[in-house]
Image (cartoon, helix red, strand yellow):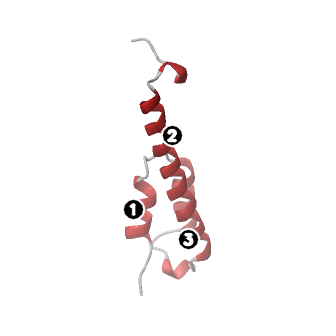
């Protein structure tokens, strides 16, 4: 299988990939800011572990969503 270069892709595909990447980056930034500002007692699990996973894992936006839904304690 021949690999394609960025310039070989259809413009709509490039736009979709750019939007998806921007969406994931925005979610990661929002999750990391929330994680940094939230007290340790309001986090399920280790803040360091969440930060590491959110920073290093390429998850198509799934991990930041999991953090927002399950990683925070609500009062």
Q: Position of residue 18 (x, y in %)?
A: 51, 40
Q: Earlier in the sequence, mark 2 or mark 1?
A: 2
Residue drawn 52% across the image and 64% down it: 31
Which of discs 2 and 1 lies nearer the camera? The answer is 2
Q: Locate the C terminus by quadrant.
A: bottom left
Rate crowding at label 2 as few (under 14), some (14 to 19) or many (20 or more) other CA atoms within 10 Å. Answer: few
Residue drawn 47% across the image and 70% down it: 45
Q: Position of residue 59 (x, y in %)?
A: 44, 47
Q: Earlier in the sequence, mark 3 or mark 2?
A: 2
Q: Earlier in the sequence, mark 1 or mark 3?
A: 3
Distance, label 1 to label 3, CA atoms, is: 13 Å
Q: Position of residue 60 (x, y in %)?
A: 43, 46
State whether residue 18 is above or below residue 44.
above
Q: Which mark is drawn over residue 18?
A: 2
Q: Camera-side residue: 67 or 13?
A: 13
Distance, label 2 to label 1, CA atoms, is: 22 Å
The residue pinned by badge 3 equals 34
Residue drawn 41% across the image and 82% down it: 74
State whether residue 68 is above or below residue 56.
below
The residue pinned by badge 1 equals 66
Q: Are marks 3 and 2 in contact (CB under 8 Å)?
A: no
Q: Which mark is drawn over residue 17?
A: none
Helix, strand or loop at label 1? It is helix
Q: Residue furthest top?
A: 2
Q: Locate the N terminus by quadrant.
A: top left
Q: Camera-side residue: 14 or 66?
A: 14
Rate crowding at label 1 as few (under 14), some (14 to 19) or many (20 or more) other CA atoms within 10 Å. Answer: few
Which of discs 3 and 2 lies nearer the camera? The answer is 2
Helix, strand or loop at label 3? It is helix
């Amino acid at each position: 299988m021949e690999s394609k270069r960025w310039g070989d892709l259809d413009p709509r595909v490039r736009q979709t990939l750019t939007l998806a990447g921007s969406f994931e980056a925005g979610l990661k930034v929002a999750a990391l800011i929330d994680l940094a500002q939230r007290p340790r007692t309001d986090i399920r699990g280790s803040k360091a572990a969440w930060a590491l996973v959110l920073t290093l894992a390429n998850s198509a936006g799934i991990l930041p969503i999991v953090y927002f839904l399950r990683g925070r304690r609500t009062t």
